[in-house]
Image (spheres, helix red, strand yellow):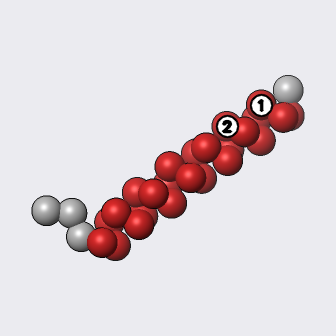
Amino acid sequence: MVSQADFLVARLHVDLRRQASAICAVGR
């Protein structure tokens, strides 16, 4: 069972990774 907090943390983590990859792509 996944708690709502864990779900939000997972979504936030994915969002941060997506932003980081986008920033890296722009930086090249």
Q: Position of residue 28 (x, y in %)?
A: 85, 26
Q: Secondary structure beneath disc 2? A: helix
Residue 3 located left or right of residue 19: left
Residue at image point 42% right, 64% down: 9
The answer to which quarter of the image holds residue 24 is top right
Image x and y of residue 16, in percent: 60, 53
Dot 2, crowdedness within 10 Å: few (<14), some or many (≥20)? few
Q: Residue at x 67, y 37 (%)?
A: 21
The residue located at (67%, 47%) in the rendering is: 19
The kind of residue on which mark 1 rests is Ala
| Residue that label 2 marks | 21
The quadrant the N terminus occupies is bottom left
Q: What distance separates the C-alpha of mark 2 from that of mark 1?
A: 6 Å
Amino acid type indicated by mark 2 = Ser
Q: Position of residue 18 (x, y in %)?
A: 61, 43
Relative to 6, 9 lies left or right:
right
Residue closest to the far right: 27
Farthest residue in the top direction? Answer: 28
Residue 2 vs residue 16: left or right? left
The residue that label 1 is drawn on is: 25
Marks 2 and 1: CB-CB under 8 Å? yes
Residue drawn at (58%, 45%) of the image: 17
Disc 1 is placed on an element classified as: helix
The quarter holding residue 5 reads bottom left
Mark 1 burial class by Cα count in 10 Å: few <14, some 14-19, many 20+? few
Say which mark, if any, is on residue 15.
none
Percent position of residue 14, x then y: 50, 49
Residue 7 position (above or below residue 5): above
> For residue 7, which quarter of the picture?
bottom left
Whether 14 is drawn above or below 7: the answer is: above
